[in-house]
Amino acid sequence: MEHGTHTQDNHAALWHGRFQEGPDAAAVAFETSINVDERMALDDIKGSRAHAQMLGHAGIISKEEADAIISGLDSIEKDLNDGSLKIDYSAEDIHSFVEATLTDRIGEPGKKVHTGRSRNDQIALDERLYLCRYIPDLQNRLLTLIDALTQIAEKHTKDIMPGYTHMQHAQPVTLAHHLCAWSWMLTRDWERLEDSLKRIKVSPIGSGALAGSGLPLDRKYEASLLGFDKITMNSLDSVSDRDYCIEVSSALSLIQMHLSRFCEEVVLWSTTEFSFIDLSEKWSTGSSIMPQKKNPDFAELIRGRTGRVYGDQFALLTMMKALPLAYDRDMQEDKQPLFDACDVVLSCVQVFTYMISSAKWNLKSMNDACQDGFLNATDVADYLVRKGLPFRTAHGVSAHSVRLAIEKNCRLEDLSLEDFKACSPLIEKDIYDIIPPQACVNARKTDGGPAEEKVKEQIAALKQFVKQTK
């Protein structure tokens, strides 16, 4: 159709009957959403197929009409999938396109597909169906990343590196322990997505525009056809609810935040000053002016795109913050930020997986970094605690030994026994057995700690998580 003119036959706007004039071309362009919601074409067809089956089951339309509608929808789905049918961007939205195409193909029965429903409950269903497809895909990609990280961790359970607080040397850990920390964050991300599906898999269809229907719709039957266990309990809430979009965007923001934190460390670790990681040339870029450069651009882009995902969530929250019940056209603006966040996070998880899986680790630089910064100071205090000294007193003794080492410009393990005894007479020569960085790591056998046996337990648990949830 040409914008600004009357449309004809089945391709008229679904709401045009009340109007004598066609909409202005600029008005059509402003309010049309098909460029955004076209990705829900298959979800719209799935919902319409179930709706037609329910209408036939309830006797609202004949079985023959229901069968014709379902057959027509099947043909549209097939043709969209094989590319023989293209989206008509002159349609107002994906619902209009599917219904008009259906009516073109099967005639009068196609006009009955919308019986007992509104675009208000239809779009709420389409979004839920879309998220039911998207979330398992993202979850699988998270599992692939967790699996990649644990495979790397398995190779480095003995390889020590500094652990940091305030970006200052704190205590020694292992590379495996650090990568497991990343992995546990991702398991929580997977679980949040899984939990969100409990509230997404609830059918709003049959709520109509806002007040249900006077027709004998069987909402529970239709929900079961869609694979939903429940229906929404209030028609007003059903069509005005976008909590599920905001909940998913919140989960996506957390995933992106975790990726951004990982990438911040990758960027730091790839610097000359750290030199802990060497990113593959396939996942690095150069400089247009400085020929020696090898830049961690993909890590930086993931970190940078976090702002987009946060912005998408804030856009959804702001859109909804003052809307009265029930549906308002503002809610058409939910899809662009939701889909953008979905796309960004999915691509970032995949890119990070490729980037980290192909990286090489500079174990010598990590080990050398553990020799400075007095990462073993806490172990001096723990040594004295085992000798019976109160921890706060032991903390002071350890701090005294650190000050002494700073004055002598040496490491704690380079202090003489006389130096240590000047700090506390309880210190004996066995202190030298417990303060090398590797010994410090091996001693930390509390559950969740960096000792090799405990990290191997974490790796096994992470592998089991992947196996159980895949």
Image (spheres, rainbow, N blue to C red):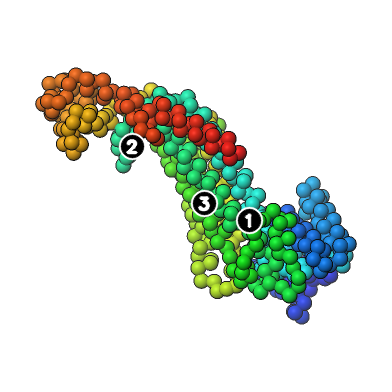
Q: Residue at 64% across / 59% down in the picture?
A: 230
Q: Residues within 10 Å of mark 2 (few under 14, many from 20)?
A: few
Q: Which mark is residue 164?
A: 2
Can residue 281 be seen in this snapshot? no
User: 85 or 462: nearer the eye?
Assistant: 462
**Residue designated by label 3:** 251
Q: How many marks?
A: 3
Between the C-alphas of marks 2 and 3, the distance is: 27 Å
Q: CA distance from mark 3 to mark 1?
A: 17 Å
Q: Nearer the viewer, residue 431 or 352?
A: 431
Which residue is under mark 1?
A: 201
Identify the residue at horizontal 50%, vertical 31% (top origin).
Answer: 460
Q: Position of residue 26 (x, y in %)?
A: 67, 70
Q: Amino acid at mark 2?
A: Tyr
User: Residue 160, percent across and down?
Assistant: 37, 26
Kind of element beneath mark 3:
helix
